[in-house]
Image: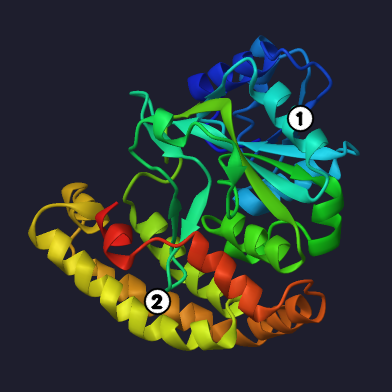
Amino acid sequence: MPTLAGGDALADCLRSLDSQTFDRFDVVVVDNSGEGRAEGPVKAHSQRARVLSNPKNVGFGTAINQGFQESEAPYVAALNDDATADPHWLELLYSAAEAQPRAGMWASEVLLAKGKLDSAGMLISIDGSSKQRGHGNPPDDFAQKKEALLPSGSAALYRRKMLEEVGPFDETFFLYCEDTDLGLRARWAGWECAYVPGAIVEHRYSQSAGRASMLKAYYVERNRLFLAIKNFPLARLALVPFASVARYFWHLVFLMSGQGKTAEFRETGHSALLLPFLVLRAHASALFHLPALLRERRRIRATRKITPHEFEALLDRHSIPLRQVASL
């Protein structure tokens, strides 16, 4: 569990873990604050957690990887510090994992504060953008246990064997989309993912970086390019620039009508004119990292267990339209 803010949110999260009906687990809190903000909540609210402290914010993926390396457990659960877990959360995830040896990832039923879904797994668009499946819908619409493309890293369970095979979170992502990249790499390697309804986590959503901050806008845009270059089959990768332009068009449409993330960005006090600058900066960073991304692409292809056609079909089954991406 990475934390940046510590405080009451982390205390609530730790209390929810102490109330789990499943008891065979330990908790590693990775403090990215550089100021020891996790120590107080951990001492006051958890008897099983230990803290790893970083001198600065090393990012979400690196923090999860540090926790992974601190454990020898056969499963690793990732949980945001601004989330609280239902008492049966780990029990249901563990039961699903033990019953599905071909799966390496399990998605939780992540709820927003008012009882609507935050995510029931993740979807992906043709431009590489990933969004939460079922976001804003009633949980009853997703009451069946079924295949998911990949889990949201805000509340997920991963099989250690899978992580050792495909590698952990890509630390160059720093923040956002690293869960999508990991999930796609695992899918190339033949691992399955399942959604586990009833494994409930309530998520306060984007507490650390803000719902529509400049930081979030930049990393989401940059990292969807990273994951597309690494993971998309060549034919789909060639479509990414054209799909990106189409999504920018829909962002503009929703901005004019006061909807979507672009409107939310403006409502938080930022000028919408900053967005093209962030897009250019994201593309420049992708170009700078291109040699390393292409090396990773070759490594993924060399160890893949499914064909590009099968991977394409998988993405198509779990796709989200560009218009919907811009509207969320």
Residue extending farthest to the left is 257
Mark 1: amino acid: Tyr
Label 2 secondary element: helix
Identify residue for label 2: 281
Where's residue 54, x and y in %? Answer: 70, 44
Front-most of residues 238 and 213: 238
Q: How is the image coloured?
A: rainbow
Q: Is residue 145 left or right of residue 50?
A: left
Q: Earlier along the polypeptide chain: callout 2 or callout 1?
A: 1
Where's residue 158, x and y in %? Answer: 74, 44
Q: Is residue 153 left or right of residue 214?
A: right
Identify residue for label 1: 94
Residue at (63, 72) in percent of width and height: 311
Task: Find residue 226 and report its image quarter.
Answer: bottom right
- Determine contact: label 2, label 1, CB under 8 Å: no
Front-most of residues 214 and 314: 314
Where's residue 130, x and y in %? Answer: 46, 59
Residue at (37, 44) in percent of width and height: 210
Answer above or below: position of 62 versus 250.
above
Q: Is residue 32 visible?
A: no
Query: Image quadrant for the N terminus?
Result: top right
Residue at (34, 45) in percent of width and height: 211
Q: Is residue 94 visible?
A: yes
Mark 1, Cα crowd under 10 Å, few <14 / some 14-19 / many 20+, is: some
Label 1 secondary element: helix
Q: Which mark is residue 43?
A: none
Residue at (74, 84) in percent of width and height: 298
Mark 2: amino acid: Arg
Q: Is residue 122 left or right of residue 67?
A: left
Mark 2, Cα crowd under 10 Å, few <14 / some 14-19 / many 20+, is: some
Answer above or below: position of 307 versus 198.
below
Front-most of residues 78 and 40: 78
